[in-house]
Image (cartoon, rainbow, N blue to C red):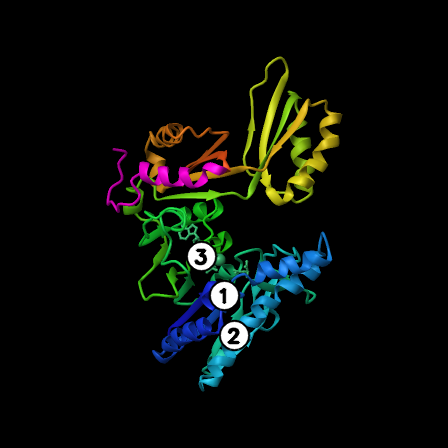
Amino acid sequence: MPLIVQKYGGTSVGNPERIANVANRVVKGWRDGNRMVVVLSAMAGETDRLINLGKELSDDPDPRELDVLLATGEQVTVSLFSMFLKSQGIPATSLLSHQARIYTNQAYGRARIVGIDTARIREELKKGRIVIVAGFQGVDEVGNITTLGRGGSDTTAVAIAAALKADLCEIYTDVEGVFTTDPRVCPKARKLDRISYDEMLEMASLGAKVLEIRSVGFAKRYDVPLCVRSSFTDRPGTLVTKEDKDMEDILVSGVAFSKNDARVTLTRLPDRPGIASRIFNTIGDANIVVDMIIQNTSIDGFTDLTFTVPKGDLKKTLELIGPLTREINADQIHSDENIAKISIVGVGMRNNAGVASRMFSTLAAQNINIMMISTSEIKISCVIEDKYTELAVRELHDAFGLEVARPRGTLT
Ligand code: ADP
Ligand code: ASP
Ligand code: MG
């Protein structure tokens, strides 16, 4: 009997009517003879509501208690979903993370799944039940509730699919699949039939929240057949899969953007060994993840250093490096929260020159200044002023002809 894991995001379970609607889709799969495991998110907006509720009572909520609070969002949807199925005479059971035995480390708010003991899920499936698992939450080795970070239900679903060696993992959301860019920002965005794991990893890490990055990592590592589809239509969606030759023919397959980071610049730093390491060790020790880093070549023994950190960590970063920069005699610290990172992604870039220059001239034609640039084998990212984000996304989408599906990518 085939085993299918389906995950439904917040909009898809946003109210009782939608829950009933997607539950019927699950029942259809079950009646067709599949074993069904369903992973649910909290209702749309619920996780944000809970975070704000926590902030009303504490400026800096205790991470353990915040996770206890946030995990309630998914508890609500799994119970409602299972209740509805049972009222229809369909055998079902809801499982929270400790019951589904999804074990994580103790990094509250961004916990990592370290193992899943599938015995209970298998037992329920053997009884012919549809198993409804709460996404986003886990349990550490001493029984504390943890959460996986925003968008974490995708990761729960793919990790369960990997652990159960499921035949298919379907991520149901509010768009019809993975698009060349966010269809809410660019009306010309085109749905992709297929995307490679590596491109999807880059897209997700650069801001395309349609799949949470760790879910893609799991899918790649454990070869999980992964599909992104809409819970509102029956159209086929996007397959996230291994790279093949045809994919390499496509030069640029997507544009991603993120407004999550802030920029920090230190001017007139003494250019001598050990300075960068002191700065970044201090920031790293506080568990702050630095993304882009640029250091100038030195002039007269001094240099400038610019880097980005998540906006939420900017205040802490400035508190940490303030005393340090005085100690090492840097001139000034500047910071800027009004930035965005725009990226183009494509495995075909590896073997083709000219992609970067087309990106830069497209931004220049709109008078958009580039503040930072970083590249890897299959992506180029530019930091720009955030007010230009939507314009830049649309112009780059046009410049690389992404609205048209092409079998072979060219730069002409
Ligand atoms: P869910 O609640 O179902 O997990 P999310 O809001 O997390 O849904 O992710 C879906 C959203 O991702 C879409 O509504 C869309 O705005 C956004 N998105 C960003 N980039 C892309 C992309 N390249 N393709 C599809 N959707 C994208
Ligand atoms: N409810 C969580 C969030 O809003 C997890 C998820 O939806 O994937 O981030
Ligand atoms: Mg999501």
Q: CA distance from mark 2 to mark 1?
A: 10 Å
Mark 2: few/some/many CA within 10 Å (<14, 14-19, 20+): many
Amino acid at circle 1: Ile
How many neighbours does mark 1 have within 10 angstroms: few (below 14), some (14-19), or many (20 or more)?
many
Residue 1 appears in view: no
Snapshot quadrant of residue 338: top right
Residue 313 lies in the magenta stretch: no
Mark 2 vs 3, N-terminal side: 2
Element type where label 1 sits in the image: helix
**Residue at which label 3 appears:** 219
Q: Position of residue 182 (x, y in %)?
A: 40, 49
Task: Report x, y in % for residue 333.
Answer: 66, 28
Residue position marked by numbered label 1 in the rendering = 160
Q: From what the image shows, is residue 95 above or below residue 339?
A: below
Image location (x, y in percent) of residue 410: 26, 36
* Residue 328 x/y as whole percent: 72, 24
Residue ID for mark 2:
121
> Which of the labelled discs sits on residue 281, or is there none?
none
Q: 15 left or right of 70?
A: left
Q: Disc 2 on helix, strand or loop?
A: helix
Pointer 3 local density, CA inside 10 Å: few below 14, some 14–19, many at least 20: many
Looking at the rendering, the stretch of residues picked out in magenta corresponds to 387-412
Q: From the image, which quarter does the C terminus lie in? A: top left
Determine the residue positioned at 71% across, 28% down: 325
Mark 2 touches mark 1? (CB < 8 Å): yes
Task: Check if residue 402 falls in the magenta segment.
Answer: yes
Amino acid type at image mark 2: Ile
Relative to 265, residue 60 above or below: below
